[in-house]
Amino acid sequence: MSGKRRAAGPAVKKKPTRASSTSGTPGKNTKNGKPGTNGTNGKPSRSRWRRAGKWLLILGLIGTLLAGGAFVLLYQTIDIPDPNEDFETQTSFVYYAGGKEQLGQFATQNRESIPLDEMPDTVKDAVVAAENPTFWNDRGIDPKGIIRAAFNNAQGGSTQGASTITQQYVKILYLTQEQSLKRKVKEAFISLKLQRDVSKEQILEGYLNTIYFGRGAYGIQAASKAYFDVEAKDLSLKQSAVLASVVNDPNDLDPGQGKQARQDLKERYAYVLDAMAEEGMISAEKAERSARRLPTFPELEQESQYGGQRGHVLTMVRKELLRLGYSEEEIEGGGLRVTTTFTQKAMDAAVQGVMEARPDGFGDKQLHIGAATVEPGTGAVRGIFGGQDFLDSQINWAVAGGQAGSTMKAAALVAAIEEGYSLEDTFEGNSPIELPDGTEIENQGDSDYGSSVSMVTAAENSINTAFIDMTMGMDDGPEKIVDAANRLGIPPAKARKKAPGFPNSSPGLEPITGVALGNATVSPINMANAYATLANDGKAADPYIIEKVVLPNGETDYQHKVSSERAVDADISSDASYALQQVVESGSGTAALELGWPAAGKTGTATNGLGEVSSAWFAGYTRQLSTAVMYVRGKGNEQLQGWLPTYFGGAYPAETWTAIMQRAMEGLPVEEFPEPANVDGDAPQEGHEPYTPPPSPTKQPPTKTPSQEPTTEEPTEEPTTEEPPPCPPLNPNCDEDPDPTESPTGTAPAPANRERYYW
């Protein structure tokens, strides 16, 4: 017995088993005892193979069904996402007046999209040959590349390239630069869908307008300018091959990066040309000939577009676009074409004029100069000087401004003539003059000019006491001066909604007795625009810097409309202008005579709350242009006296004004100012009548009768030979020409060089 127990029931007889010729019995083999093989040759049995094949087929079918289902599921669930916003943007360009010369640009990415038909065939062919030779025929994906990425990822490597143009476009426009299998699969499915929805031409156009070429350039148009300074439509074969080459590695194939980069570029460049020849796009001979050397790369200006004064201008333009209602997104990436009022000539004149006239040895970190030129009649701001290089300081002193000083006296002249005073009416010229509250106002140097100086003389020599007397002689004089200033173009103290001006407020412009002496803060742009009103016979125009805005489709979206309105009566304007002409002819602003054109203007110097000289100005105009120049120190209100060699407005500011205007006026015809109208109304206060010198007594000859014998005896009383009192200096109503170095009252000497340097 074997010791084994069988189940209950009758015994079953077993039939002997015969060995199969095709398969062995598991666990037995007559020859070698190896299971699963026959005893003859040790090979698997045929039935085993059939069963294995059957299972493999079943598994394959299941896998295929699962893969197909997964494909369908992924295809249905992976939608084409919204494009990456940055790659949908286009560069907005800013131009000088006329819309041809580029001043600068705004961009999230430096891109200027152009249609495919504006791209030369050489570019399209070169990129296709180098990046995706099967582009025109494939389905938009590279299955081998996806499999390679899968294996590479599984082995811990980085995702490799070899994507199609469609896949690259999808990655850039819709996805991220993440290196993963998931992104690669998503890229493939979006590519398939995109291929279904848009044409090959549209894909290539989008790709060439989107891909990064290095040097900050996105798209073929920006790249053409960045590398060769030409429009894309003008690219040659060799230039096209270079740009198709740098797409492969924009950072390391830029020839500007050195000798090695240039050598690497040349190798890639030759590869692109060979690929074009292999695809039949060019002949082999042409490819070989072109590959011998790279094209010439022009020397391009690498200065930051915000360097120098351009940063100040572009910042002004951006703020003005925002004020006009454009969003940051539209400005940065809307592809706008913005034409400004600035001219290259006036901008250069401002920069060169400042550099020529500013004192040597004073760095621009402490000495700040602001200047602006405005066109009378239109309000167009033609040029500015904002101070330091924008990259060093973003304060634009042409906008920030400073205390206006006696440049505000132009508004006082207008207000006084409107109230009935004339150019010949007289005012207190002696110093000091006491205000109703007991405050004393002095002339520069506490100088006396006589008790009856004409309005013209007061303007010529910037006599503070005369302007205080003038202000107090008008009913509500301070209010009327502020109103005149506003009408001329100086913004109010507090900004009003949508009010014009750069900026649109003048802090401190309040109706106080000394308002004509210029305690208010005014910008050079606004001051130049106010004086431009007088240059334009009293018609004011709002200052502006944007002429028009054009959309990418060529439609004009904004156009400035010049409008001027009567701010001051023409006769009153001509009289005020006449007084300001005398400032240049024989007063405190004679430095401006060097201009050589008929000019009018006013010097200005202001003091801060500590009594320190805080600013120096000269504002003036010809018939064609109005310019204001301001000098300040430090934070804009620090002491100039004792720091600058001379701090008067008739010195450096007037000389700077002249240097700027000489350049800005070059080529313009000479235009004369109108003659003064000599408006003479009813003066609001008595005691300001024009100065009339007393008559000179005449010597009477002695009389004699015919019967009277001549006598040799001396007369007992000499006839009077008293001379008339001296006239106030430079009084147009006086025939006498006194010595300007003597005080007209004999009580105090006049300051040296009085005719030039006054407040």
Image (cartoon, helix red, strand yellow):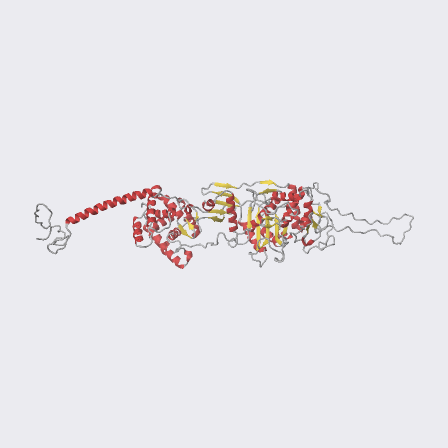
Rendered image quadrant of residue 32? bottom left
Q: Nearer the viewer, residue 59 or 464?
A: 59
Q: Nearer the viewer, residue 722 or 469?
A: 469
Residue 23 place in picture, x, y as percent:
13, 50
461 vs 130, left or right, is: right
Residue 633, percent across and down? 58, 55
- Name the residue at the right extreme: 707
Please give the name of the residue rendered at 79% of the width and 48% of the height, measured from the top-left corner.
696
454 or 505, nearer to the observer: 505
Q: Quadrant of residue 76?
A: top left
Residue 412 visible? The answer is yes
Q: Residue 334 placed where, x, y %?
A: 45, 44
- Residue at position x 10%, y 46% in the image: 8
Q: Is residue 214 above or below residue 199?
A: below
Total labels drawn = 0
Q: Quadrant of residue 33?
A: bottom left
Horizontal side of residue 101 vs 484, given as left or right? left
Looking at the image, which is closer to me, 19 or 398? Answer: 19
Where residue 305 sits: x, y (%)? 48, 52
Would residue 282 be visible to someone looking at this image?
A: no
Left or right side of 256 for 153: left
**In the image, 314: left or right of 75?**
right
